Image (cartoon, rainbow, N blue to C red):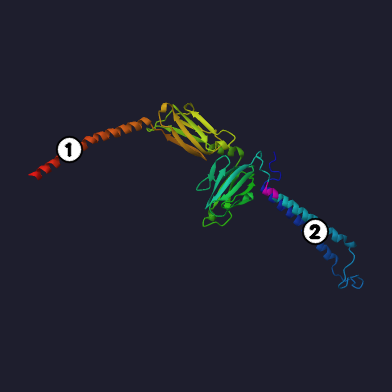
Amino acid sequence: MEVLPHGTRVDVFENIFLVFLGLGTLVGIVVIAYTLYNAYKYRDTEERDDAEEDLPSVGELPTGGKGGKKLFLSFGLSAIIVISLVVWTYGMLLYVEDPGLDNPNDDALEIEIEGFAFDWNYYYENGLETSSVGSGDGMVIPADTPIMIDVTATDVWHTFGISDLRVKADAKPGEHSETWFVAEEPGTYTAECFELCGPGHSDMDSPVEVMPQDEYDAWVDEQLTMTITLEDEAEERITDGFELALEHQENDEFDDDLSVTYSDDEFENGSITIGEIEQGGPYDLAITFEDDEYEEIEETVSFTGPVDETYTVEDPDADDEDDEGEDEDEDEEEPDNDTEDADDTNDDTTEDGGDDE
């Protein structure tokens, strides 16, 4: 399916440039040639006799020229060329603004870009999140795929742009700018901020990694990987008698059911690596145990990249034993208190007897 009938943004702007360059060169050649021709034709020579020339007088319109046909032809051709050029260019620019990728069947990848001082965050439609902070991945995209971007900012006005891909969009707080681009060649590009935004403006750049489709799919699978491990308080693996349940917090908003359940049989030595989840985001995690052997675990997992979590289970009987131990300690302390009270009473009695004497 031909997703982009007029090519990429790079193709569009190169075509516009080449058309203007070609027409400009052609018009320049014609004008210069015609000027040189007339300069040669009407050059001043000794054979010329001004008396025999039918020259116009001051204030008199010249005659001849075959009734103005040349003038009409030149103006007509110029008007046709200029109007055609304007209409064609305007149509190509409209295509740049809206390439017609709103159809869900089109093979376009949507990414939300958030600018802040002085880095970029990227939010993918499948729930993944990447960033240019530190040694982050930056933007990772497949080659030969239309990329629809929605750009905004959280603090001040920035401008997101990739010079080599002819794409640029304003990033304003509270506003969204939408545009698109296609990277045909795999490689590493650089996204920059093109709006002076503060002392770190010159360092506000981000890597843009363009991968072949198969490598990009492998990267996505690697990002959407969750490893869960269960241990007891002695750091021994829990291998049986439990069940793991995961459900996306926005499950109702998706067409597919984003809830999965895994039994202890699917764990290997108390650990499981989940790779079949295709939608990231916040998940509710629940681990229940048979016969209430351990306390149930309930957590929220932010599945926006690779997750590797180890959960330490607690024995509910251990808490009861601790409570009983505390009660026994309190009981042992009570006789001491009674003894102290008795000593205090004896002291008071002795003092009273001394006073009576």
Residue farthest along the front direction in this orientation? 356
Front residue of 126 and 81 = 126
Front residue of 207 and 298 = 298
Q: Is residue 262 above or below residue 131?
A: above
Instruction: Kindly indicate whether the residue at mark 1 contacts the one at mark 2 (C-beta within 8 angstroms).
Output: no
For the residue marked with disc 1, what is the amino acid? Ala
Residue at 84% of width from left, 64% of height from top?
38
Residue farthest along the right direction in this orientation? 52
Q: Dividing the image into 4 quarters, which one contains the C terminus?
A: top left
Residue at 16% of width from left, 40% of height from top?
345
Residue 218 visible in rendering: no
For the residue marked with disc 2, what is the amino acid? Val
The numbered dot on residue 49 is: none
Give percent across and percent down for residue 250: 54, 38
Is residue 48 left or right of 128 when viewed as pictured? right
Q: In whole angstroms, how far apart are the C-alphas of marks 2 and 1?
A: 125 Å
Q: Is residue 285 above or below residue 69?
A: above
The numbered dot on residue 30 is: 2
For label 1, the residue is 342
Local crowd at mark 2 within 10 Å, few (<14), some, or many (≥20)? few
Give percent across and percent down for residue 277: 54, 34
